[in-house]
Image (cartoon, grey):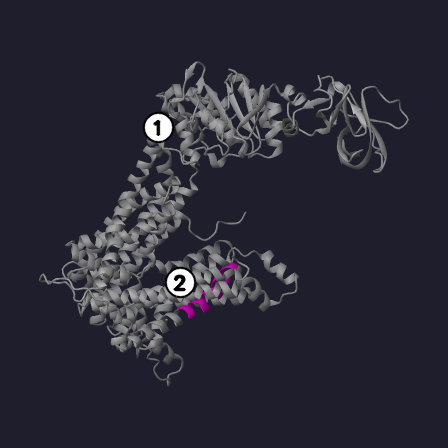
Amino acid sequence: MTLAGRILLGLVLLFLYAPIAVMVLMAFNASELYSLPMVPTLHWFEALAGNDKLLAASRNSVAIALATAVLATTLGTMAALALSRQAFWGRSLLQLLLLPPIAIPWLITGTAMLVFFFWTGIGRGLHAMILGHVALAIPYVVLVVGTGLRSLRADLEEAAVSLGSTPIHAFFAITLPLLAPSLIAAALFAFAVSLDQFVVSYFLATPGMSTLPVEIYSSIRKGFTPEINAISTLLLAASVGLFVVSAILTRMGGEPERR
Amino acid sequence: MLDGVDARFEAGRLTSLLGPSGSGKTTLLRVIGGFVPPDAGRVLIGSADVTDVALWKRNIGMVFQSYALFPHMSVAQNVAYGLRRRGLRGAAVRAEVARALELVQLTGFDARRPKQLSGGQQQRVALARAVVTKPRVLLLDEPLSALDRRLRQEMQIELRRIQRESGLTTVFVTHDQEEALALSDRVAILDKGRILQEGAPADIYEHPKTVFAARFLGDVNLFTGPVTAGGVEAAGALIRTTTPMPPRGTTATLAVRPEKIDLVPPGAPVPPGNNIEAVLMEVVYAGAMSTFLLSAPGGIPLKVFSQNRTATHPEPGTRLRLAWSPEQTMLLEA
Amino acid sequence: MTAAPMSRPDRRRALGTAALLLPAYGWLLVTVFLPLGAMVVFSFLKTTPIGGSKPLVFTTHNYLAFIERPYLVDVAWTSLRLGFWTTLLCALIGLPAALALARATRGRFRQVLFLLTVLPFWTNGLVRTFSWTMLLREGGILDDALHLVWPSAGSIGLLYTFPAIVIGLVHAYLPYMILTCYLAVSSIEDGLIDAARSLGARGPAVFLTVILPLALPGLVSGAILIFVPVIGSFMEPRILGGRIGVTMGTVIEDQFTQAYNWPLGAALSFTMLGVVLVIFALFSSVLRGRLMPAAA
């Protein structure tokens, strides 16, 4: 049972990672047609440096992701504080309202934004993509920060107040420092959600103002070039780096070790 | 949660609020501390009305059930927190912190983090943090409930010493009657948001007013029956007490604690005072003493504690004579 | 808690709560809820209100698209088949993998494996889909690998076929199923299985009577998490299916980006959402009625 289980897990991981590994390898392969044997080269990464369109899209992606991380973390943390601290009428409804941005297919959310932003004159472009990305990231932030808040005992703030802190001072002196890992993890999560977001960006981008995934998609549809592999490899590396940092911060590595 | 509570806590004394869970004892503590505003009534500390004084200006010390130590601060920083909030800085803070840590016997633990301490040590830090500001009232919310039995007994003695040395007016919430009796100058028994009885530990143990109070403070044998001349008829005997009795013909409940009852050896002269005959059902042996479970006429269950001076016990099924003095017999309200 | 009139601190606290909630929910209102509402309105419009100030004409016409355009029925059938096969394969691989993770690994090793299975969540789906094109196309890496072992073999050439889309979608959504099943299965204690064994259950019986019922919530939530987005997927079918990859997702996308028939796109979106909801309503009542008679 144990051996069979491990073999199965190995096969599943092979299935999950083989294509990604192939793509990363091909980014370093000289052949434009992805033919073997491999001839290592950094040519495609160098070519990237001259591709203004991809570079501009990358800059947009990072800018939008930064804005999303800051805005979604701020708004989501405020909401998480209100939702997890006290019971009030309508709280479960508000918590339920966090589901649609996650659960409704992005195709529908994205096209709905397109329609509504067009109708109201908000239009498309950088600001529209930030509006959309923040909306998609807020539920995740509320989830991550809410979990962090729940692990914080409410009596810590009470203890601080009984010792002479005003409630506001207690929040900044006690709660915020203890919440910092959750906040950073939430911000990284929001950053990653935005950086990898394709569907919503696809509908809200304009020809002059697009993001990296949108550019990758149109390149793929035009035809394959190993440059896409190179930029995708960089994007993967960024995502994986963010994941590792936030996994360490939230210790989301499965259940805690048994004692 | 609370229903017309009128309580007075003597300055410099340790008063326990004792009650089952849901009795309102923690709520009362939180009202005194200012964590929850009372719907009606006033809270006075000394002669000052603090009902509308914000919690952070009330100058109270609180030890929480979970200790609520700040995990991101060292022991010294935890203890210094309240001093700093009162504007103290530098050497003054260090001196006070050192004195408080000495009081709880944790000198040298300044730089540790709460996580690196045992439960008992965390408890002491929480106590040091609460007393270092010389609060007008020290509030303790079941502070020993998270400790194991042996450590809890040690900490009871420690707590008593620290309270005496600091001379702080202390209110202690607990659901453990032994702890309340061992620690307190005064004990208040709460049930359903009311204070049932209040007094010195020995006083309320020996003279509980109600069946609830008698039972909550320890084991008790109850005899309910009609009042006749000089006593209550129950368990096939007339049970007497030195307390004035209600009028004849009414029903009354008399009670006696299990440790007050003597087992009369067969053939020995029957002593004066109350005595009844009962059948031994079971003996629960516990080393230093044994618990005898008996059945008196009328099916009344009885419990007797007996020191194990000899190693022999009567067999279950034996008829035994039980005797105790009318002075030890308590008259209870239902 | 009694319904007493609010005291002053209570009212201040309520105001504080509202002030904390307003920014986030205001944002969601403008970017998600109002747009979805606008979509509902749009789905009843006769024409896309772009340019000009033509009066808005309302119609239910767009919801009759499936009757008037029979090819849409085929498209919907393709989407449902994609959803079915993807969900089924994810369940068939995901549940055993979750069981293996929970029961065949320990401690630090398990943590690392767990992180490795959820890590693909964080990588760009587009990039992962694209990587399959290199493996699956004629003369691609899979062909090369095959020819290394068996030089005279033909080409696999799966790219631009239905199985290629399913493979890409399974790759994209398998981690969801492993995660939800793992969360359900990891709470099963060894003692429970020992108890079943001690009562006379053999391997398959243990699986059917103990493990499967306890893993069912994980399977169901995994299925929902996979089926819904697969039905609405358009990027994977386009990249891996090429010309045969015509699904509800791609048709809806076309209405917004090519045909500019927004009302029809909106109506198709809601029809799709409705169909998915109906399927799940049926599915969950069947589950509740047949498989979990005791569980309330």
Q: Position of residue C163 (x, y in %)?
A: 36, 76
Q: Residue at x 8, y 62 (%)?
A: C52
At mark 1, the secondary structure is: loop
Judged from this view, the residue extending furthest toward the front is: B249
The residue beneath circle 2 is C224
Q: Residue at x 84, y 31 (%)?
A: B320
Q: Is residue B225 above or below residue A179?
A: above
Magenta part of the protein: which range? C87-102
Q: Is residue B167 above or below residue A219?
A: above
Q: Residue at x 27, y 62 (%)?
A: A108
Query: Chain under label 1?
Result: A
Task: State the residue in front, B202 or A30.
Answer: B202
Query: Toward which corner of the image does residue A235 lie, by quadrant?
Result: bottom left
Query: Chain under label 2?
Result: C
Task: State the residue in front, A11 or C289.
Answer: C289
Q: Which mark is residue A166?
A: 1
Q: Please state which amino acid type lies under the numbered disc 2.
A: Ile
Query: Toward which corner of the image does residue A83 lie, by quadrant?
Result: top left
At mark 2, the secondary structure is: helix
Residue density around tag 2, few if under 14, some if 14–19, many if 20 or more, within 10 Å: some
Of marks 2 and 1, the one in the foreground = 2
Judged from this view, the residue extending furthest toward the right is: B267
Residue A28 shows in this picture: no
Q: Please state which amino acid type lies under the numbered disc 1.
A: Thr
Magenta span has C100? Answer: yes
Quote the CA–CA distance across marks 2 and 1. Answer: 47 Å
Judged from this view, the residue extending furthest toward the top is: B47
Q: Is residue C39 above or below residue A72?
A: below
Magenta span has B198? Answer: no
Residue B219 shows in this picture: yes
